[in-house]
Image (cartoon, helix red, strand yellow):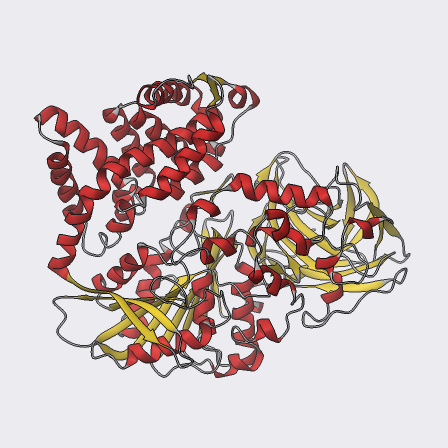
């Protein structure tokens, strides 16, 4: 819930007038007086100027912030109406989720109103309202009530005090900052009140229905210990299949996840990676998880409550642990895995195509600072943004990032010691021939805008490459990292996804478990091995393989013909060689070369100081399905280059739709396991294929845009091109600017499904 409000703030989009608006907030007044007064001002402004604060009609974020202000202002009846409006967004397509959305806040408001109208103590009013709401939910839906209600008060206190310290320096506060402060204050006040009341009520409900073993320790083959939570139904009369999660993110929700499995007719087991929760061992992400997961599965298979069938699921890191468990052979009890948004350490995180990415740096203390999660440190965005900017401005070596931060980080340093996809990374998860021995049915889920999609598709493609009989399904659509694991975001970075894309992926995963572990019916959406939602068509399509999604390939070359603000793309291979020059001065930190875009749809186009090329308008519509690829022909005055390739659709209405991108290091283009430096001044072909998969109906009259660029900004490692270890290079290596010649016989290949032949 804390994360929801924080994300709501992040998605606020305001015009300059609203952003600069100041609200009265006297610094010397008691918070019990000043915060309700501030919240009243915020609520008034949100109702009056809400249109400025809603990104492309995404009302959920606006309503969540309005609810927060109303609650702090003690406008409880109004807050309940706002919560109901927020729930209405989901009620038609997912009524169970809608009923739980903002449930702690709704319960608090109703209890406040009841206590006032019935003249009874708040604790009694809360008990009545809470139990009524809880019992309205089915057993399959109330499993996570504890993780919604039992927030960590110490974390909320730290977050509010930090926000207050940054803002309460004058007698005024900007509107956006006021919204953020209200969200932190409201969360603290609500949960400080309800946690001690909800905890015994939830414990009593658990005692009625479940047997919960929350302190199991399993010893691994090498003598380490793994902390395990087991949840079974009290009414269970015989051994059952087990749904198992292996998770580095130790938290309250672990019991909720295990409880959900039990509520769905399984035994639920959540194990935390070594060093987490009750484990006394050192916390080391990735390195031991494959063997440890196998050992936990072995322990599960020998328990009297297990019928010999185990299935694994969850996403991101937990997607990786599933694949890691198969590294040295699939345990006989493991009957299926359902990896969502699965990362591949060393391949797509902490580096993408051998380029290290800064966002992962803050993740290390998040999971290693204590036995659970260090939310306060991880959520300190000012610290992380400041760190990136300091490092970028200083020109220091990438390896000095932790020194600049003031916190030595041996895990970060160990990762930097392995810039190639070498044995260190290969030993962590399934690799090459390992996939040949994976013969269990698998369902992978990911999204076109899932940051871990490249990893998820790596597993999918490698499995099919090394195992011709792979029984592996793919479900993919317009989802981000979290949407591809549970419930999609209706508005994704300004794009309203098609109605048919609003599916409950989490429910589909449990349907898959019923299908594989209990002989049930296969999920209806899985009509073939490849199941993908074509953006802009409001349609799901299905194909037996990635190759059979399309019936043609568009090939584009670079042209010097000017078309508006762009150069041109042409379908004709050039008869005369020419090149496009680009100079990047790594010593100049006043400019950046950046492939990133914050919005999926935008009227403005920003090439990030790169070179853009545009096709002619298409005469009829068609689909792009899959990953684009190509080969860039370049000559540079250095030995290496980090570069990006972006793909956009320029729609007939003049808006740009961001489709896909590639980021990579030229010296690893032909072999990610071994570096091959470029020869300065020599024209070299740099192939690329590891791009983000997409599916989109391209409209008649649309055009495609390609952006080529070098990589220089605070968010990724900087490659100065000397040929030395990139992590040790500094701005002292930037005395000579990078000069790139992008040759016109470079080509881009885009897989398409044509409705007719004459699209171009």
Residue closest to the eye, 158 or 359: 158
Q: Can residue 521 be seen in this view?
A: no
Quadrant housing the N terminus? top left
| Quadrant of the image occupied by residue 721 | bottom right
| Quadrant of the image occupied by residue 409 | bottom right
Q: Which residue is drawn at 57% across and 39% down?
A: 601
Image coordinates for residue 211, horizontal then vertical, percent: 17, 65
Determine whether, in the image, residue 294 is placed left or right of residue 665: left
Determine whether, in the image, residue 387 is placed left or right of residue 519: right
Image coordinates for residue 662, horizontal then vertical, percent: 66, 56
Q: Residue at x 56, y 50 (%)?
A: 697
Residue closest to the eye, 705 or 493: 493
Image coordinates for residue 159, horizontal then vertical, percent: 41, 38
Q: Can residue 56 be seen in this view?
A: yes
Image coordinates for residue 656, horizontal then vertical, percent: 62, 40
Q: Residue at x 43, y 80 (%)?
A: 222
Residue closest to the eye, 465 or 654: 465
Determine whether, in the image, residue 716 is placed left or right of residue 613: left
């Amino acid at each position: 819930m804390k994360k929801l409000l924080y994300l709501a703030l992040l998605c606020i989009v305001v015009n300059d007038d609203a952003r600069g608006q100041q609200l009265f907030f006297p610094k010397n007044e008691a918070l019990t007086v000043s915060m309700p007064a501030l919240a009243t001002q915020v609520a008034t402004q949100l109702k009056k100027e809400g249109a400025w604060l809603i990104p492309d009609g995404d009302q959920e974020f606006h309503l969540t912030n309005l609810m927060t202000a109303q609650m702090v202002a003690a406008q409880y009846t109004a807050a309940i109406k706002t919560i109901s409006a927020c729930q209405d967004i989901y009620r038609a397509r997912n009524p169970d989720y809608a009923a739980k959305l903002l449930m702690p806040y709704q319960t608090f408001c109703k209890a406040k109103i009841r206590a006032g109208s019935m003249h009874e103590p708040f604790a009694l009013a809360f008990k009545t309202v809470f139990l009524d709401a809880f019992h309205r939910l089915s057993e399959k839906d109330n499993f996570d009530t504890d993780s919604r209600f039992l927030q960590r008060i110490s974390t909320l206190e730290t977050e509010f005090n930090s926000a207050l310290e940054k803002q309460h320096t004058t007698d005024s506060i900007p509107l956006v900052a006021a919204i953020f402060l209200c969200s932190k204050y409201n969360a603290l006040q609500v949960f400080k009140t309800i946690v001690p009341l909800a905890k015994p009520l939830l414990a009593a409900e658990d005692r009625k229905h479940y047997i919960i073993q929350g302190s199991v320790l399993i010893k691994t083959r090498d003598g380490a210990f793994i902390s395990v939570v087991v949840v079974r139904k009290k009414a269970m009369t015989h051994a059952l299949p087990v749904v198992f999660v292996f998770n580095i993110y130790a938290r309250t929700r672990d019991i909720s996840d295990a409880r959900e499995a039990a509520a769905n007719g399984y035994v639920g087991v959540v194990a935390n990676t070594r060093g987490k929760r009750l484990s006394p061992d050192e916390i080391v992400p990735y390195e031991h998880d494959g063997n440890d997961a196998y050992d936990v599965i072995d322990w599960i298979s020998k328990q009297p409550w297990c019928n010999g069938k185990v299935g694994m699921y969850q996403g991101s890191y937990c997607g990786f642990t599933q694949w890691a468990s198969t590294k040295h052979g699939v345990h006989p009890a493991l009957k299926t895995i359902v990896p969502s948004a699965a990362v591949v350490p060393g391949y797509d995180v902490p580096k993408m195509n051998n380029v290290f990415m800064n966002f992962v740096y803050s993740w290390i203390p998040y999971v290693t600072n204590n036995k659970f999660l260090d939310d306060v440190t991880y959520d300190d965005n000012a610290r992380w943004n400041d760190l990136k900017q300091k490092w970028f401005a200083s020109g220091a070596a990438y390896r000095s990032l932790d020194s600049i931060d003031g916190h030595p980080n041996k895990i970060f340093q160990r990762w930097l010691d392995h810039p190639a996809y070498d044995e260190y990374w290969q030993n962590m998860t399934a690799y090459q021939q390992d996939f040949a021995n994976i013969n269990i049915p698998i369902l992978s889920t990911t999204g076109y805008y899932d940051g871990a999609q490249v990893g998820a598709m790596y597993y999918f493609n490698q499995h099919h490459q090394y195992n011709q009989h792979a029984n592996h399904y793919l479900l993919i659509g317009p989802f981000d990292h979290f949407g591809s694991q549970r419930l999609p975001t209706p508005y994704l970075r300004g794009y309203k996804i098609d109605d048919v894309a609003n599916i409950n992926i989490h429910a589909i995963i449990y349907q898959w478990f019923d299908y594989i572990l209990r002989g049930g019916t296969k999920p209806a959406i899985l009509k073939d091995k490849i199941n993908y939602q074509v953006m802009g068509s409001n349609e799901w399509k299905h194909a037996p393989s990635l190759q059979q999604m399309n019936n043609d390939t568009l090939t584009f070359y670079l042209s010097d013909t000017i078309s508006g603000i762009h150069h041109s793309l042409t379908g004709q291979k050039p008869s005369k060689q020419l090149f496009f020059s680009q100079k990047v001065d790594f010593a100049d930190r006043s400019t950046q070369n950046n492939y990133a875009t914050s919005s999926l749809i935008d009227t403005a186009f920003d090439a990030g100081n790169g070179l853009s090329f545009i096709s002619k308008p298409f005469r009829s519509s068609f689909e792009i399905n899959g990953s684009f690829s190509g080969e860039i022909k370049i000559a540079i005055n250095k030995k290496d280059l980090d570069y990006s390739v972006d793909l956009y659709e320029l729609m007939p209405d003049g808006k740009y739709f961001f489709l896909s991108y590639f980021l990579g290091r030229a010296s690893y283009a032909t072999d990610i396991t071994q570096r091959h430096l470029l020869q300065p001044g020599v024209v070299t072909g740099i192939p690329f294929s590891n791009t983000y998969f997409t599916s989109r109906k391209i409209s008649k009259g649309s055009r495609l845009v390609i952006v080529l660029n070098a990589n220089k900004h605070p968010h990724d490692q900087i490659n100065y091109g000397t040929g030395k270890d990139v992590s040790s290079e500094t701005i002292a290596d930037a005395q000579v600017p990078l000069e790139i010649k992008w040759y016109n016989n470079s080509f881009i290949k885009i897989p398409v499904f044509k409705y007719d032949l004459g699209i171009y």
